[in-house]
Amino acid sequence: MDLSLLKALEREKVLEVLHRDKILRSMEEDRIRRLKVELQDLRRRGAKSISRQYGERTCARCQKPLGRFWNTGAVCLGCSHRICGRCRVFLTRRFWRCTVCHAYREVKVKSGEWFLEERGKKFPHETAQHETIGEKLLKSHQRLGNISIVPPTPPPFQDVAKLSFSRSGNFTSSPLTKSMEDLVMSFNSHIRRISKSQSDLRADLLTVNYDRTISMSKSQSDTAISTAFILNKGPSLSNIFKKFKEWEQQTSKSLSSGALTDRDTSLSSGETRGSNSSIETDADSSGNPSVTGEIEIALAYSFNTSCLEILISACKNIMFGGFKQRKCHPYVKVYLLPDKSSGSKLKTTTKKNTTDPVFKETLQYSVERHLLASRTLHVSVWHSETLKRKFFIGEVLIPLEGWRFEDSSTKSPAWYPLQPKSDGGAVDQVVGLLLVKVKFSNPKHTSDSCSVSHEAGQLTVLVTGVQNMTGSKSGAAFVKGSLTLPGGQILSQRSPVVKKKSNLKWALQLVFSKVTLHELKESVLHLDLWDQATFSLSERLLGTARLQGAPSWQALQQMPSVWHSFSLALCTSINTRKP
Amino acid sequence: MYSAGTTMTDGDYDYLIKLLALGDSGVGKTTFLYRYTDNKFNPKFITTVGIDFREKRVVYTANSPNGTTGKTFKVHLQLWDTAGQERFRSLTTAFFRDAMGFLLMFDLTSQQSFLNVRNWMSQLQANAYCENPDIVLVGNKADLADQREVQEKQAKELADKYGIPYFETSAATGAEVDKSVITLLDLVMKRMEQCVDKPTADGHNGEGTSKLDAAPAHEKKCAC
Ligand SMILES: Nc1nc2c(ncn2[C@@H]2O[C@H](COP(=O)(O)OP(=O)(O)O)[C@@H](O)[C@H]2O)c(=O)[nH]1
Ligand SMILES: [Mg+2]
Ligand SMILES: [Zn+2]
Ligand SMILES: [Zn+2]
């Protein structure tokens, strides 16, 4: 028998199996998606709606009032909320969870999340934890097929998005050639991992050209892009995992303790490792706007009502956007971490036009005393620009472990210096990197002299792609940009929709006109990446990237007319959207 | 307790459980799975190329803790079949990581295949999703009594050593086939529950200790 023929047949056989597996997998993914939707619905219905009433004794699920002596409710181990007798699901005679925690548990079991968690403990350093070996093999095989037929030439950019923009020197072939190299490299390492000793199989795979893949590539460059995109695209289930994470944060206490936390850390560190350096360099160049100011807080625990009382007294000397603004409308937001859900969120009123606001407002959490030891109070100060747009001013994290509420001396207010946004606070989560180029052009002048600085021109922002993006499986995306000028004026732009399949290199252009270089120094550029899911009705905010602070704009000030590249951390919107 | 389902192409099931059969070439993995899913016997020996899988939908009835039969669930079983041949080894062992439970098979008429069980165990330890996954030891071809080389006592001892159930099956007659798969499924389902319901650091619900806290330790192989 012809050996090479046999191998080709073998390969065909294995591929046929992998394709069948893929069909089953997509059926499974659909099912999990449905589970998640149901869970979200249930959760929404059960959420404490009015945060102001949080301190009151009501069942966290049905909102029915709880009595002091009769029908007092009990604390759910999953979420630490007080739950009435009717909103409990008993697993054994005494062991129960609230309806929402129970539903969460069900999803965790039914979606196979438990399995991924367990495996994550044994193989904490594996990337793409959720991917099955079949999926990996199939992908790498398809990649291979593509690679062998795609010459390493860059795609013309017109293909990517139908946008008119001036081609500048930055758009040479080098980025793509580079990415092709990366592609081949990562593929090789991939194969090495999969088939350590099976050299025959590897050789096979490396030489095969598949008819399938050829017909798939109607334009070679397109194929190159979509091929590369497979590498960058987030794990197919990661949307779910992301939601799970949110959930986990809400219910982390008993549902998983070590397990998911471990997995989270390894997962996120694994995913961001490659990008860390770029985030840091970006942070260096953009230089976090310095945070100043203090906040006066007093904490007390009422043993009568089982409430944690937080007196937000005042703030002084606060700054926003790197400089002291007269138009500062501050308010204070509080979370009782690790619960980052809206149910845990409390807010003060907003004070107008002040950098030394006096609040004197008491916020309350109904929570058992012994549960406080594991909690951290997250207090952040925000500037409310508009109803929709909020700016971060500073924050304080107060761990409640060892806090002596019994001691009355701890009840007096204390001033806490405000801190920049902490990574550890993890209210903000980096979900990827947004690759951005900016330049400033002035219709009248081409010179870069300083006089230009006060002349109006236009800021062109070109979003060229995303990197290390978690989530966002398929479909289309677009970018909404808003430029907040020092005076508080906001210019907004929306890019066309780009197919995420033809990813890696986008050319989404946003133009902000009638701005001066001088203004830009003190402006904040927000770029929101939106997912336009094919089947869902709504658009989904994937993350927000920010360009702000004098250092970020510095290069532009010096050479306005050339492209300046930034890789901006895309953060989940918790902070910017729902403060 | 279990019954075969009907349609398999829709997502109308509660759990996808992935099991995997492993063991030397020729012990009857493929035949065994074929018997389980289709209740048929194929006396021909067709070498499995690398990997393969079969599916079956079953109804699982969970036993509630107080002994009464509890809820029923639809389970979609994905049963991975692997080639025992050395030359596919790296491919097949790679698939170990995605399985939730394992049918470790040997041929009752082949002493060698039984001796190799130890090697397969160490392969599992290295490649499976956790250090002590759910495994059922299966001695197949029990119908060929006159050719038997491995005694039940021998195999039982080994299984006890590993702390796993042991079954003597025949893909030819179908004896014990269902039972061994179902036993494995049961172990996996229980493991799943344990993994999500492990006791919390916080302790108690404020209404006495939970029953799970007091569950016998030997039932929990789960490291979580
Ligand atoms: N008599 C008998 N033959 C069996 C039994 N199970 C498998 N066989 C035969 O053993 C040979 C190898 O079986 P196969 O399933 O291909 O083994 P695999 O390599 O482990 O997949 C085939 O000829 C089967 O018909 C059994 O229980 N009884
Ligand atoms: Mg076989
Ligand atoms: Zn209730
Ligand atoms: Zn709960």
Image (spheres, coloured by chain):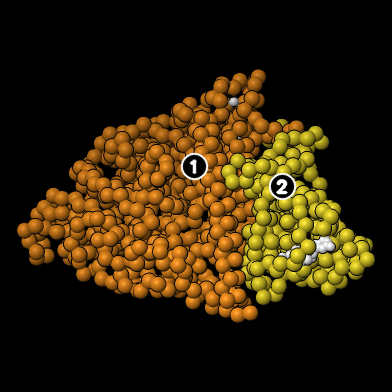
Chain colours: A orange, B yellow
Give the crowd class for mark 2: few <14, some 14-19, many >=20 residues within 10 Å.
some
Q: Position of residue A381 (x, y in %)?
A: 37, 42
Q: Quadrant of residue A90?
A: top right
Relative to the observer, which residue lies in front, A383 or A437? A437
Residue A59's disc number: none
Residue named by callout 1: A340
Answer yes or no: disc 2 within 8 Å of ligand 4.
no
**Which kind of residue does numbered mark 1 sit on?**
Lys
Relative to the observer, which residue lies in front, A233 or A289? A233
Query: Residue at (56%, 40%) from the top-left corner?
Result: A35
Relative placement, left or right, of A235 versus B208 is left
Relative placement, left or right, of A13 versus A394 is right
Rendering quadrant holding ligand 2: bottom right
Q: Position of residue B197 (x, y in %)?
A: 68, 44
Residue named by callout 2: B189
Q: Position of residue B21 (x, y in %)?
A: 72, 61
Q: CA distance from mark 2 to mark 1?
A: 31 Å
Q: Position of residue A206 (x, y in %)?
A: 50, 75
**Which kind of residue does numbered mark 2 sit on?**
Met
Give the crowd class for mark 1: few <14, some 14-19, many >=20 residues within 10 Å.
many
Query: Residue at (49%, 76%) from the top-left corner?
Result: A207
Q: Residue furthest left?
A: A444
Look at the numbered disc 1 and give the secondary structure of its residue: loop
Q: Chain of mark 2?
A: B
Query: Residue at (93%, 66%) from the top-left corner?
Result: B146
